Structure formats: C-alpha cells, structure tokens
Amino acid sequence: MQTNFSAAQLADPHVAESEKILRKCVHCGFCTATCPTYVTLGNELDSPRGRIYLIKDMLENGRPADKEIVTHIDRCLSCLACMTTCPSGVNYMHLVDHARAHIQETYKRPLLDRLTRAMLAAVLPYPRRFRAALKLAGLGRPFIGLFEKLPALKPVAAMLKLAPSAIPSASPMAKPGTHAGQGAKRGRVAILTGCAQSVLDPAINDTTISLLTRLGVEVMVPEGEGCCGALVHHMGREAAALASARQNVDAWTRAIDQGGLDAIIITASGCGTTIKDYGFMLRLDPAYAEKAAHVSALAKDVTEYLAALDLPEPARKPGTIVAYHSACSMQHGQKITRQPKELLAKAGFVVREPREGHLCCGSAGTYNILQPDISAKLRDRKVKNIEATGASVVATGNIGCITQIASAARLPVVHTIKLLDWAYGGPKPEGVSERGLVAAE
Ligand code: SF4
Ligand code: SF4
C-alpha cells in the first residue's frame, strides 16, 4: 500500500513503525473472510482491511480520532485472526495498538463510556479491588433488566451478568515464595500470578504449580509481579500498560539474577500474547529494552513448556471427550496450535475441534463488557459449534474464554491444565467425569 507521510511525521518512531506495517498491506482482502466482526456485521469498515484504511487516513493526515473511526476500532476484538490469514505478514496488532493509543490521546468519549473505561482500568488489574467489586455486584444484579434497556448502561448489565455469584478464596500458593520440585530437578520457572484469573479461578495456578512440582520443576512466585497490562493496553492506555510491563520486567529480572529461570510460565494466553510483546512495547526505553526482550523470550504458555518436557505416561487415561477451544491469543497471538491438543490426547482424552475454531468467542479482554451485543452473537455461535462436537467438557487456556463460554454453555468449561493434572494423578476437575459423562447429572 502506498503511503504519504511527511519526513516530520516519520520522525515519530510510532508513526514510522505503523508506516512500515501499512506498506506491507496489498489490499487483497483475504483477512476479511476470517474476521469475526466482518463475518457478523458484513460491513467493510468492520473488517481488518477497512480498519487499516481508516487508521492510515487518520495517521497520514495527523488528525484526531473521530466518532467513525472510534466506532470501528472499538468493534475490533484484537483477536488477530487477520494476522493468521494475511499472506503479506501485516502486523495488525501493532497497528491497532497504535491507533488505540492515538484515540485515547485525541478523542473525548461520551461521559458514561469514559467512566466505564476508567472504572475497568482502575479495578480489573488489581485483585483486591476486583474481588471487592465482585462482592458488590450482587447488589446490582436485580437491576440487570433495567440497565439492558438503556444503551449507555448495557456495559454495566454485561458486567453484572458475567460476575460469578460465588467467589473462591484467595490462594495461599499465589503468595511470593518458592515451591520445590519433587525428585530429580527438571527446571526452575517463575509463574505469573496475574490479576483477574487469580480472583475468578485461583485453582488454575494452584493446579499448574502442583503439576509442575510433581514433574520435578521448581516454581517460584516472584515478589512484585502484577497484571501484565493487557487490559489497559487494549484500551489505549499506553502509560499504564508500560508501567505494568516495567514492574513485571523488574520482578522477573530479579528472579533471573537470583538463580536463573528456564521460563516464565503463563496460564492465561491473553497475558502471554502481551508479555511476549514486552520487547516491542519497551523497545524505545533504553533502560528496559534489553531486559524486556529477554523476558519476552522466556515467556511460555504452560502447555508450550509442558510439551517440551517429555512427559511420562499418565497415571490414568480418562477417555473423556473434550472439545478444545483454542483462544485467539493462543492460536493467533502466540501461534500455539498443536501443543495443547497433543498433550490432551497423550493424557488419554479424546480431543474434538469445534467448527469455525478460528473465530473469537467474543470475550477479548473487556470486549464482552464494552461491546455486549456483538460479543453475545459470537459467544452463541461459538457455543453452538462446541456443543455440536458431542463433547462433555470444554478445555481452553484463557480465563476470559472460560468465563465467556461458561456463561452460555451447558457443559463444564475448564482450563486445559486441570484436565492434564487429573490425568497425571491430580484431582478430578469439578463436573467432569470419565468416558464422556458429566458427573453432576
Ligand atoms: S483483530 Fe480480529 S476483529 Fe480485529 S480486524 Fe483482525 S480479525 Fe477483525
Ligand atoms: S490479508 Fe493482509 S495484505 Fe490482504 S488486505 Fe488483509 S491485511 Fe492487507
């Protein structure tokens, strides 16, 4: 694609990077076929190619974002299916991240939208605040119907619907410290405790620590790590995202200095995609660029790490039929497609892949709150495809997808690690049974 940026514009490294990306696009439109918002809405401006043109026009003319571009960029899930499809290697992720930061800097949103976003940014990345907010959600639940009728309050209704009625206790295993591996030592890793996941389902990381230590891996929870920054990054809040990235880079660099790390284990693929991008996000900061690139290179999804461990034969082969839902951040963001399925199959599960597996479930960070209508359409389509597999449990590697799919599916939705842990001698995940039956029924 031809571009027309001035030399002065290209002196800004963010613009220069976006220009390089834009020049790679050959307008072929292959990406439109796999874009969930184009498939759902049928509007070229809600396709990757349409958004690329809108971003190009905004950046080339150096103008502030307007309502039209904000509408279409807000509808983008950042699912990155377009990057998987694109034959020209267009890095849509970095382009849309730049556009979102530009929108945040130059566009004044309506008051309620601003308040909702500010509240999400102030609450979700902080486990104590998020836990308190979930407890308060019970008070708002009777008003969901009323909020749904008022377009500006639909995000509040979506939030209340997603909030679980029971919140598990915080896990003592998530506190800073070291969990020794059993038997012959096979590695030393740090684990990201994260933010929302540690509140919604702390058992995911507990199970990961339990399985890894049984396999001989020492797992440390470093002092000072926090939210990866993805939630605010996707809202265009660059300063907050970079502050989170620096905090984690510092925490993990200390851990590396104190005894080395073979990997930084991530159990939420949404976080994994962002942490693997820290090297790019902090490339312009001389104090952090090198350390951030090292951290990104060490970041591994737990299934990626397990697949390289050469696991023993499982303790039991459950035979349960599992629908594997590959989160967008797993398959498109990190290109991890094979390992989770192979691990499940080796552990004795019968793995089935739902149709349209490339399409997002509509979770996408805060998307299911900020764009509830499109999100619900994508969720229902996803659940229909999952249920058509005849599986009795859904496995996936991202807490956002677990919450989203579980809000509409009639079968249990669990993190992949819980099924693997069960096969390798751990407890049976709740609601799941051997040979395709749901225990609770
Ligand atoms: S990231 Fe997803 S929703 Fe956004 S343009 Fe690409 S395919 Fe479409
Ligand atoms: S598939 Fe790639 S090159 Fe083709 S229009 Fe989409 S982004 Fe551009």
Image: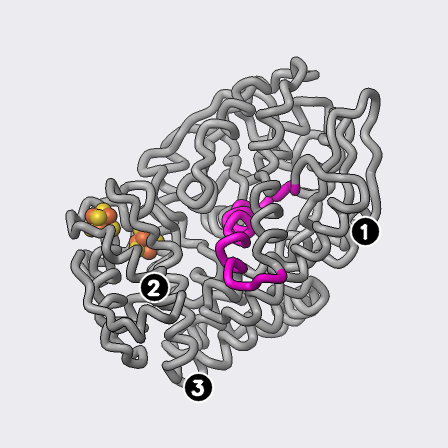
- In magenta segment, residue 275: yes
Pointer 1 residue: 176
Question: Residue shown at 28%/41% (left/top)?
Answer: 85
Q: Which residue is mark 2?
A: 16
Which quadrant of the view contains residue 108? Answer: bottom left
Disc with the residue nearer the chain's start (2 vs 3): 2
Quarter of the rendering containing residue 367: bottom left
In this rendering, the answer to whether 346 lies above or below 352 is above
Q: Quadrant of residue 184?
A: top right
The residue that mark 3 highlights is 111
**Going by the image, does 10 lie left or right of 115?**
left
Q: Is mark 2 within 8 Å of ligand 2?
A: no
Tell me the distance, in whole angstroms, between the alpha carbons under discs 3 and 1. 39 Å
At label 2, counting other C-alpha atoms closer than 10 Å, the crowd grade (few under 14, some 14-19, many 20 or more) is some
Disc 2 marks which amino acid?
Ala
Callout 2–callout 3 Cβ contact below 8 Å: no
Residue 177 at x, y percent in the picture: 83, 47
* N-term mark: 1 or 2: 2
Few, some or many residues within 10 Å of mark 1 (<14, 14–19, 20+): some
> Is there CB contact under 8 Å for labels 1 and 2?
no
Amino acid beneath label 3 = Leu
Along the horizontal axis of the image, is 75 left or right of 410? left
Return the residue nearer the eye: 206 or 308.
308
- Image point 45% across, 75% down: which residue? 147
Q: Residue at x 56, y 51 (%)?
A: 275
Q: Give the structural element (helix, strand or loop) at label 2.
A: helix
**Whole-Å distance between the Cαs marked 1 and 2?**
41 Å
Q: Quarter of the image containing the N terminus?
A: bottom left
Which color scheme did the rendering employ for the protein? one colour
**Secondary element at tag 1:** loop
Amino acid carrying mark 1 in the image: Pro
* In the depicted structure, whether residue 86 falls above or below residue 108: above
